[in-house]
Image (tube, rainbow, N blue to C red):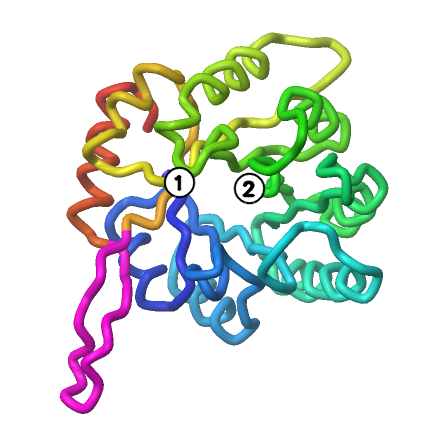
């Protein structure tokens, strides 16, 4: 059970309520960007589960120019020196295919730290071909909703991906398929029954009202009861 967070309070809630791993980013409302270093340092000092770092320099598409690639490399180097446990990124070509050259460069910078190909996968032109490319590159995981807005909608492709990656091969190490997007305590059992997945990704967030009287804006945090309920469901399926 990986919980994606974009602030310190969220990371602590996830950790204290049984998350297996944290994906740390900034700007979850933009589907996650590279987090700031200070936040990571504080969280790293407070929790004892792996922290994967989102490496995404801007919102929008996943086709980056050379300066953006250089900034991604520098971010990886900095977080790696600070003992990040993994990195989450993905680069596509203009034709919506996996960019073999640039992703390989970034994986080499990550080495030997784990690398996850993020939901750029969900906009590729040919998902099964992209899976082969990502496996050849050496990614350990793929974060995906099955090329739909939610994992429940992408059920069929997710099942196909998991079935393919469960096959043993002497020539290739398949990445773990991590299910993401729209997964909650109400649909988790159905998704697990259909896909037989190994890993899940969710924010488990609910909107809260700011406690400051002068600020009545809402903000989102993981909900402890949602996390624990989803973990209980996962345990019923021998996932955790």
Is 53 colored magenta in this rendering?
no
* Quarter location, residue 46: bottom left
Q: Residue at x 23, y 71 (%)?
A: 218
Q: Is residue 205 above or below residue 129?
A: below
Q: Is residue 202 above or below residue 213?
A: above
Assess disc 2: are there few (<14), some (14-19) or many (≥20) residues with their C-alpha within 10 Å of its C-alpha: many
Q: Quadrant of the C terminus?
A: top left
What segment is highlighted magenta in the picture?
205-222
Residue 230 at x, y percent in the picture: 24, 36
Residue 131 at x, y percent in the picture: 66, 25
* Quarter location, residue 186: top left
* Quarter location, residue 66: bottom right
Q: Exactly how many numbered labels are in the figure?
A: 2
Assess disc 1: are there few (<14), some (14-19) or many (≥20) residues with their C-alpha within 10 Å of its C-alpha: many
Residue at mark 2? 119
Q: Is residue 110 above or below residue 207?
A: above
Secondary structure state at the residue bearing disc 1: loop
Of the numbered discs 1 and 2, the one sitting upstream in the chain is 2
The numbered mark at residue 12 is none
Horizontal relation, residue 23 to residue 85: left or right: left
Q: Residue at x 75, y 44 (%)?
A: 107
Secondary structure state at the residue bearing disc 2: helix
Residue 101 at x, y percent in the picture: 85, 41
Q: Residue at x 16, y 80 (%)?
A: 211
CB atoms of marks 1 and 2 within 8 Å? yes
Tell me how far mark 1 sits from mark 2, CA to CA: 10 Å
The numbered mark at residue 181 is 1
Q: Residue at x 35, y 28 (%)?
A: 152
Foreground residue among 240 and 94: 94
Foreground residue among 97 and 230: 97
Residue 43 at x, y percent in the picture: 43, 65
Horizontal relation, residue 172 to residue 198: left or right: right
């Amino acid at each position: 059970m990986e919980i994606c967070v974009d602030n310190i309070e969220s990371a602590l809630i996830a950790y204290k309520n049984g998350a297996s791993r944290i994906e740390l980013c900034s700007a979850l409302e933009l589907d996650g960007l590279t987090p700031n270093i200070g936040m990571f340092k504080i969280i790293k000092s407070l929790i004892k589960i792996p922290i994967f770092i989102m490496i995404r320099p801007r919102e929008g598409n996943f086709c980056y120019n050379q300066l953006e690639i250089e900034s991604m490399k520098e971010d990886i180097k900095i977080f790696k020196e600070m003992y990040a446990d993994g990195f989450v990124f993905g680069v596509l070509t203009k034709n919506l295919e996996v960019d073999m050259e640039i992703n390989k460069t970034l994986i080499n910078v990550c080495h030997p730290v784990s690398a996850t190909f993020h939901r750029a996968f969900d906009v590729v032109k040919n998902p099964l071909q992209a899976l082969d490319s990502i496996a050849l590159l050496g990614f350990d995981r793929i974060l995906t909703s099955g090329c739909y807005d939610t994992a429940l909608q992408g059920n069929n492709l997710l099942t196909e991906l998991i079935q393919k990656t469960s096959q043993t091969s002497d020539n290739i190490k398949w990445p773990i398929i991590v299910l993401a997007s729209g997964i909650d305590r109400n649909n988790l059992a159905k998704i697990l029954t259909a896909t037989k997945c190994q890993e899940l990704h969710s924010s488990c967030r609910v909107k809260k009202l700011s406690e400051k009287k002068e600020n009545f804006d809402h903000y989102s945090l993981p909900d402890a009861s949602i996390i624990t309920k989803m973990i209980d469901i996962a345990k019923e399926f021998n996932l955790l």
